[in-house]
Amino acid sequence: MAFDFKKEFKEFYLPKDRPEIVTVPEMNYIAVQGRGDPNQEGGAYQRAMGVLYAVAYTLKMSYKSDYRIEGFFEYVVPPLEGFWRQEGGSGIDYGNKDGFLWTSAIRLPDFVTPADFAWAVETASRKKKLDCSAAEFWTVEEGLCVQIMHLGSFDSEPESVAKMDAFIEEQGYAGDLSEARRHHEIYLTDARRVPPERWKTVIRHPIRKV
């Protein structure tokens, strides 16, 4: 059976619908950076999705090619993630979607090296006839965070964020959002096929001890 990150690392992908504190270790990602409204039809965010999945599935299916990745095992492509910020502030203004600076990402298995990643970008570009040069091998160690499973549309996320803020204050922590430590979302449902009231999104914020 293929390795499934969501099942093997439930503490990072399947939190409860109440705030909890977690320490997130270093992880590697396929990442594409951009800015602007993610809902814009044919915009930069949607183009980034094509690049991410082209590279992700090239790596996943590499065992069927002539290329060999040392330590490879079959796995389920992890869910899409997003790291979000806006200029001029440490929070997120959900009404200012044009002001989003985003990094869209898909987690990589630890056995994928930068050399393997470069092969996948070149191969995906050639076979898919798609410029994948925007894809980066990106490493992040989020460290101490608070997270929650948000149920519902993205526009209702402030309700869950308010719960997280109240919880960390009670526990003696403060939010630590910055240019480097960002609002983080993990998307567990396909918004194209599931109605908004049933969307499941992990929301994660960096924190620090007061």
Image (spheres, helix red, strand yellow):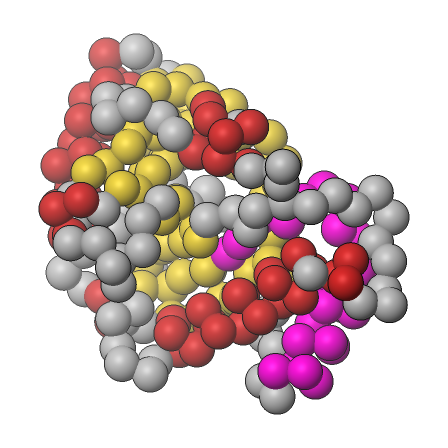
What is the quadrant of the C terminus in the image? top left
Residue 59 is situated, as x and y percent measured from the top left of the image, at: 69, 60
Q: Which residue is more in the foreground, 164 or 72? A: 72
User: Which quadrant would residue 132 be assigned to in this image?
Assistant: bottom right
Q: Quadrant of residue 128?
A: bottom right
Furthest residue toward front: 1
At 30% from the left and 68% from the top, the residue drawn is: 38
Q: For this view, does 131 lie left or right of residue 73?
A: left
Residue at horizontal 74 percent and vertical 77 percent from the top: 122
Residue at the far top in the pictured view: 171
Q: Left or right: 97 with respect to 62?
A: left
State which region is magenta.
105-128
Q: Which quadrant is the N terminus positioned in? A: top right
Foreground pick, 47 / 77: 77
The answer to whether residue 178 is above or below residue 43 is: above
Query: Is residue 121 within the magenta segment?
Result: yes
The x and y percentages for residue 111 are 77, 44
Location of residue 5 with respect to 36 vertically, above or below: above
User: Is 74 situated left or right of 116 in this image?
Assistant: left
The picture places residue 133, in percent across and down from the top left corner, at 64, 78
What type of secondary structure mainly makes up the magenta span?
A: helix
Q: Residue at x 36, y 45 (%)?
A: 188
Q: Position of residue 67 (x, y in %)?
A: 85, 65
**Going 30% across and 23% down the picture, which residue do you hit?**
16
